[in-house]
Image (cartoon, coloured by chain):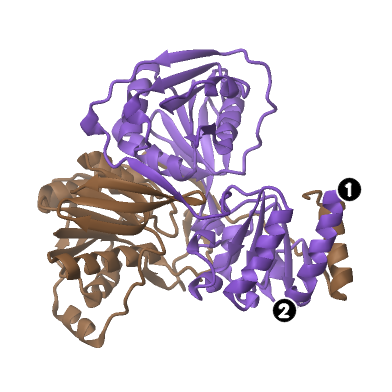
Amino acid sequence: MILIFIEVRDGKVKKSSLEALSEGKRRADDLNTEANAVLIGYNLEGLASEVLLYGASKVYVMENSLLSHYSAAGFSQALFSLVEEIKPEGIFFSASSMGKDLAPRLAAKLGVSLASDCTRTIAKDGKLEVVRPIFAGKAYITLNFKSSPMMATLRPNVFPLAEPGEKKGEVVRKDVVIPEDQVKAPALEILREEGSEIDVTEAEIVISGGRGMKGPENFDLLRDLVSLLPHSAVGASRSAVDAGWIDHQHQVGQTGKTVSPSLYIAFGISGAIQHLAGMSSSKFIVAVNKDSEASIFKVADFGVIGDLFQVIPYLKEELKKIASE
Amino acid sequence: MNIFVFVKRVPDTESKIRINHEMGTIVEEGLSFVLNPYDEYAVEEALRLRETGGGKVTVLSVGADESLVILKKCLAMGADEAFLLKDNTPETYDGLRMAKIIARALEKKFLDYSLLLFGKQSVGADNAQVPSMVAELLGLPQVNVVTKLEIEGTKGTAHREIEGALEKVSFSLPAVISAQKGLNEPRYETLKGIMMAKKKEIPILAFEDLGLKEEDVVPLLELAKMESPPPRKAGKVIEEEPEEAAKKMVEYLHNEAKVI
């Protein structure tokens, strides 16, 4: 059995968890076993039935008021008790902020190793094999597991979401007993920057600006484009972040975030090697740059040599036309 | 406060990575190595905490003798002491192995810790596993990807970066914290710091000193293959009037790429 941890944020199931479940189900089919999911928290009513649509044979629901706020210590304790009982062969997480925080804690509790941020999973000789980027995508490694359960976190936005199907599975409630002192470092509240609901790692379209943006105020041009394109987010190069034009949360590259959106649009980004590492697994790359020699054109599927400040206003018009079609 | 910072030697982020396919490793020749950028934020935060609250900053690295260079840099930045936990094993990409070595070192040699600081990940392995694993092995609270840290007495609060937002987390010491860009602006070494660091000895601890045997830290992940990413081909590049360029770009995205 492959167990998939389903993350809940703001009372909703996170899409990247459903991607992990979809992938877990595909590998479970290859291995002639089942994919089961687990929800942890408090007041999770109704969420399990949504998870069943994505192929889980069982959805375990573990509720306890001590788990109403996320903590790696508390959640890993709950997961540990479930894993000890149901003995899965594999455990998948989304490599989201929560997955990257929780999975290693559980792995250490189980005494097993973990493959982080995988971009491919393969069933081979009755076991799992995974492929993951290193150096932010400058190289890829294939890993085999020497410990069981085989644990992996899967990069968001990479694995196709299954078509929601029939609910064939069942919901299984599991008691979870957690001593209060086991809930260490709980997240008390969530502080949100206005107008930044989608993170660059989760966006389907990333619209990035670099040194060519010339100043912080011009990032409003990119925010305008984001408002015209659903599921999009503003990204930035390291030089724009280091100049203080935009918060580092938006930085794409080796010391920022690695992204794999369907579309990456680079405005005024020359394409330093550490930036290219962070975005070259995007499905389509479009670049606008004044410098015809900019390295970004070597990886772009479509490039425009020109002044971004002149191109963007027309771009907005064209996008509005598409939206009204 | 007794602060420990864990640092790693990594290739500079501007490096081109070449692969030795026979060995399944990266080619180190011609690379320049630096203190992991995220670890710099961890060292800086430790120094700031010492400046405001007193205490001691000890820096540790697990690795071969080459890692002495980054430990010297940390001393030059102002750390009080540095130790090398000697390990000649090439990168295994197994976070648990590293976490076991660190947890053992703390239990055997440095039990009086109040705060353990890490970078949120090393650039290279990109695992982001070791801080959480050390926290679990030692039974400590963890806060990862931290952009703001406040400590008062034995209690702390931190801001932890999550998707499009921050989580405010409270914890008690001792605790594990991993640093994200934005936590602070790391200082440069001063000439005086460099001179002082030169005089400081960096003790080297072997596995035997920690009561560790190689078989205790066998990697549980097997590296089957290392490859270069699939190359991207340069596509169409146009140079036209802005209006025409915008039109063609949207046409491409809508009709050919079908992404909008």
| N-term-proximal mark, 1 vs 2 | 2
Q: Quadrant of residue B183?
A: bottom left
**Is B7 drawn above or below residue A324 in the view shown?**
below
| Residue wearing tag 2 | A293
Q: Position of residue A215 (x, y in %)?
A: 59, 77
What is the crowding at mark 1: few (fewer than 14 residues within 10 Å), some, or many (at least 20)?
few
In three-dimensional space, the C-alpha distance between marks 1 and 2, rounded to whole angstroms, equals 36 Å
Q: Amino acid at mark 1?
A: Glu
Q: Amino acid at mark 2?
A: Glu
Residue ID for mark 1: A325
Label 1: which secondary element? loop
Q: Are marks 1 and 2 in contact (CB under 8 Å)?
A: no
Q: Which element carries disc 2, helix, strand or loop?
A: loop
Instruction: Tell me, by letter, which chain the rendering colours brown.
Output: B
Tell me the residue at 86%/49% (across/down).
Answer: A324
Indicate the colour of chain A.
Answer: purple
Q: Circle 2: is it few (<14), some (14-19), or many (20+) Cα within 10 Å?
A: few
Residues A219 and B82: in front is A219
Q: Is B87 on the left-hand or right-hand side of B257?
A: left
